[in-house]
Structures are given as structure tokens and as C-alpha cells.
């Protein structure tokens, strides 16, 4: 199930990136897979990931993602190809899964007519800065601030993608401004092209299965339901509680859901519009002078407020949020 490629058959070039789970390497420019136009990269997992997760479990999860891609409609594949570094093949060695092949994330992936088609994209956190810092970055490193319309389009495309993934039965998991990239062209092209790009998709979890790599929480994006469980676990450990009870709570605390995705996605919206140290509190307690409240209408703002409900079952779906961001 799902395309597999032997690692020995790959010509692995220079390392271009490294993260918590593995390293990413260029593949030759003329490398082709599934008849698709490249460039492509190879992500190889660290040994401790393969050991702790067990290669067979990684392979099972990756195979499911690759198989999902193979069975998408042509329209769905095109949609994913232009927005996400989705696993296109599982790479195996004598021990099982060693990594995956995916698209290389560069400007032309999102915008075929980009003036600098091979330029690298940066994580969204670089745009969640003070205005002064953004100006400094734009001068020093060639960053372009998002225009007001660019921000709206970015969020519309962000929530539309999340809703699409949820509709297909996936839980995204570690949503944060560090794990989402931004393509921000010149101001006059932002309405048409200012877009999010999604990486670490191998951490997505099929709602009835597991993920290839662990689904983590970025520190400032932890939902309230996990905080409650973490507090209970800490109390039980302090009071020498039952190991079985502690383990059960730990499993529940580690399981992310589509509702926790909604909470984290709403945080992205708030932080993109508010440079303060406590943007969530400022948004929830503010008047219509809040930047996000000024940008969208009341029905959209109400959905964002509901996304922060402490009870996950009371939060809107991602599809409802996506629809709300277009209702402006």
C-alpha cells in the first residue's frame, strides 16, 4: 500500500535543513516521481525516532498518507501539491521506513509566476513581530510586510486548507507560527498570491490511527484541555497516585483532536493581527478597536471567540471557521 522507494536507489545531495525528527536533503534536479515536476527532497528520520516509534509503525503511517495521496482526485492532488509538502513516497532500508520523499518548498510551488521562483520561504513567526521589527527585517533580509488585504487572504487560505484536511479525516496536531510558512510577494500581488504553505505533514494523524512522527504542542499553543490533564497528572504523581490512572491521563493528554486544531488555528489569526505580549487576552477582552475585530465582521469574530471555549465540544468546526473568514 503506497509507493515505496529503496534508499539505496536515491542520489542524496546536500543537507538543506534539520529539525527535531530528521534532516532534509536535496535530490537531483532531474529526479522525477509519479511523473510530477520537481524539485523534490528526501527527509530522513533520526535514529532515535525510528527506534522509539519503531520503523514498522512509521512505515504504516507513512504508507497510509502516500496511499491517501494516490487515491485523491486530480483536483485534490493539485490542491495539495500547491500548498503542502505531503509525503509522496515512503523511503525504506533494511530496517524498514527511513524517511519520505516530498516536494521542495520554494516560491514557485505556490506561485508559478513568482519573480524569484526558487526563493526559500520562511515560517510565519517572522511576520508576527512589532511593526518596527518588521521594517527592520524587510530592510535587512528582504522581507515584505503583509498588507491588510494580504493578511485577510492569508487567513482565508489558511483556514480553507485546514478545513479541507479535516474534511478528509485528518488531525493536524502541532499548529503554530513556527510550523507554517508564508509566501508574501510584492504588495500588488498579495491579494492573489499571499499564501500559507504547510510542512511537517508527516505529523498529521488519521483520526482513527496514528501519525508517523509524534504530534507535539508548541509551548504557546497548548489548548486548555491539555493543561487541565497535565495538572491532574502532576497532582497524581505528587500524591503517588495509581500508575494506571496516570498512564491513562498521559495518553489522553497526548491525543490531539480536530477541536484542539481549531483552538490553535484561532490563535494564529489573533497573533497575526496583534503584536502585543498577550494577544489572546487582549482580543477576548477588547472592544471593536482590536485589529482583528476591525478587520472582520461580527459573525466571524464570534466564531473565533467560540474557538477558545474551554470545552472542546463547544468549539466551531474548521469548516465553519473557514466559511466565516470569507464572510467579510
Image (tube, helix red, strand yellow):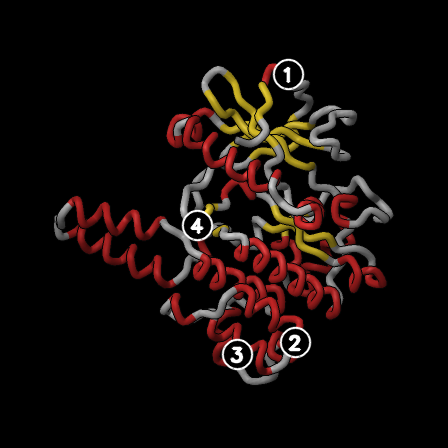
Position of 269 with respect to 256 (left or right) is right
Q: In the depicted view, which residue is nearer to us: 122 or 88?
A: 88
SS under mark 2: loop
SS under mark 4: loop
SS under mark 3: helix
The answer to which of marks 4 and 3 sits earlier in the sequence is 4
Q: For residue 53, what is the image quadrant?
A: top left
User: What's the CA distance linking mark 4 and mark 1?
Assistant: 33 Å
User: What's the CA distance linking mark 4 and mark 3?
Assistant: 27 Å
Image marks 3 and 1: residues in contact by CB distance under 8 Å? no
Residue drawn at x 39%, y 66% is 312
The answer to which of marks 3 and 1 sits earlier in the sequence is 1
The answer to which of marks 4 and 1 sits earlier in the sequence is 1
Q: Where does the C terminus fall, quadrant-wise?
A: bottom right
Q: Disc number at residue 327?
A: 2
Q: Disc number at residue 302?
A: 3
**Label 3 vs label 1, nearer the camera:** 1
User: Label 1 belongs to which residue?
Assistant: 9
Amino acid at each position: 500500500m503506497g509507493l515505496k522507494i529503496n534508499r539505496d536507489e536515491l542520489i542524496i545531495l546536500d543537507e538543506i535543513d534539520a529539525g527535531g525528527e530528521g534532516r532534509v536533503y536535496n535530490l537531483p534536479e532531474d529526479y522525477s516521481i509519479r511523473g510530477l515536476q520537481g524539485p523534490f527532497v528526501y527527509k530522513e528520520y533520526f535514529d532515535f525516532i525510528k527506534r522509539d516509534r519503531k520503523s514498522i509503525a512509521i512505515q504504516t503511517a507513512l504508507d497510509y498518507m502516500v496511499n491517501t495521496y494516490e487515491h485523491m482526485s486530480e483536483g485534490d492532488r493539485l490542491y495539495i501539491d500547491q500548498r503542502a509538502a505531503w509525503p509522496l513516497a515512503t523511503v525504506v532500508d533494511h530496517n524498514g521506513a527511513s524517511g519520505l520523499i516530498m516536494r521542495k518548498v520554494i516560491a514557485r510551488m505556490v506561485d508559478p509566476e513568482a519573480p524569484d521562483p526558487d526563493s526559500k520561504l520562511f515560517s510565519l513567526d517572522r511576520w508576527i513581530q512589532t511593526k518596527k521589527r518588521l521594517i527592520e527585517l524587510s530592510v535587512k533580509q528582504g522581507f515584505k510586510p503583509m498588507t491588510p488585504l494580504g493578511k485577510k487572504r492569508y487567513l482565508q487560505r489558511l483556514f480553507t486548507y485546514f478545513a479541507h484536511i479535516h474534511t478528509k479525516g485528518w488531525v493536524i496536531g502541532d499548529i503554530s507560527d513556527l510550523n507554517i510558512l508564508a509566501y508574501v510577494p510584492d504588495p500588488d500581488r498579495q491579494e492573489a498570491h499571499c499564501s500559507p504553505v504547510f510542512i511537517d505533514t508527516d505529523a498529521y494523524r488519521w483520526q482513527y490511527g496514528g501519525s508517523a512522527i509524534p504530534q507535539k504542542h508548541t509551548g504557546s499553543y497548548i489548548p486548555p484541555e491539555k493543561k487541565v490533564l497535565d495538572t491532574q497528572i502532576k497532582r497524581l504523581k505528587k500524591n503517588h497516585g495509581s500508575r494506571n490512572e496516570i498512564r491513562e491521563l498521559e495518553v489522553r493528554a497526548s491525543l490531539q483532536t480536530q477541536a484542539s486544531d481549531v483552538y490553535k488555528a484561532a490563535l494564529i489569526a489573533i497573533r497575526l493581527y496583534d503584536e502585543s505580549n498577550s494577544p489572546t487576552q487582549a482580543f477576548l477582552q477588547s472592544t471593536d478597536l482590536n485589529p482583528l475585530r476591525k478587520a472582520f465582521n461580527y459573525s466571524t469574530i464570534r466564531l473565533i471567540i467560540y474557538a477558545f471555549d474551554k470545552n472542546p465540544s463547544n468549539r466551531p468546526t474548521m469548516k465553519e471557521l473557514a466559511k466565516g473568514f470569507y464572510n467579510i
